[in-house]
Amino acid sequence: MSKESLDNIDAKLSEMLTNSMHTYDLAMNCLLGDTNLDTVRDDLYNTDKSINELHREVRREMIVHSAVNSRNLDIPLLLSYMTMSKDIERIGDYCKNLFEIAETGNTFAKGDDLDSYIELRNDIGKLIVYLQSCLALDDESKVQDLITLGSSISSDIDVKITSLLEDKEKVQYPVATTLFFRYLKRIVSHIVNAATALIMPTDQIDYLDE
């Protein structure tokens, strides 16, 4: 692909991540703080629409490139970008799911677990920012660090989910809390999957343990 095409796609992916971070902050503030849902609902859903449109623009960019360069396609690179774009787009979808938990009246703004929830929120937010920085840098070691950190956070969330499902942990909203952790795990998984597309061979994208 030409440098101009690559730069255009990188810019769109970076903007998708900026918007994803915004929707993530809005949703988590509704669950962990006293944010009025009515004041952020339109912002959250409009930002998600922007993410979806950017995802479509990335696909269009690659379709045009494929048509113009049909005899000299870098297919692995195209597949990597498609994977990254789709994974980033899914972050916004799970942020909407988190917001929907808040819309049911469930809140985690009070209780003994609030500090740990805030810490987890911050850790995942840092992953989104870290992925954005990895897009701008050609540094495989940083991507590996992101993958390792994300996988560790995902494993910790798995422990929480298992504990809740086995009724080993008592919480005020068991169903909502389980969904909360499940959606966060999916966000982390999509961040890690997007990161694999930066460094992994095409056949190993999304398959870290292979």
Image: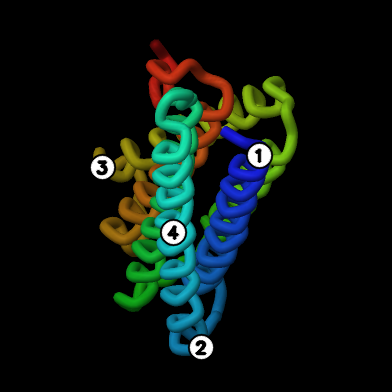
In space, the residues marked 3 and 1 are separated at their CA atoms by 37 Å
In space, the residues marked 4 and 1 are separated at their CA atoms by 18 Å
Q: Crowding near pointer 1: few (<14 within 10 Å), some, many (20+)?
A: some
Q: Mark 1 — residue? A: 135
Q: Please tell me whether residue 28 is drawn above or below residue 116 in the rendered image.
A: below
Q: Amino acid at mark 3?
A: Leu
Q: Mark 4 — residue? A: 92
Instruction: Indicate the secondary structure of the residue bearing disc 3.
Output: helix
Q: Mark 3 — residue? A: 165
Residue occupying image coordinates x 38% and y 65%: 96
Q: On residue 77, which mark appears? A: none
Query: Pointer 3 and pointer 1: residues touching (CB < 8 Å)?
Result: no
Instruction: Indicate the secondary structure of the residue bearing disc 2.
Output: helix
Colour style of the rendered protein structure:
rainbow
Between 166 and 35, the residue placed more toward the observer is: 35
Residue occupying image coordinates x 40% and y 44%: 63
Q: Earlier in the sequence, mark 4 or mark 2?
A: 2
Q: Mark 2 — residue? A: 39
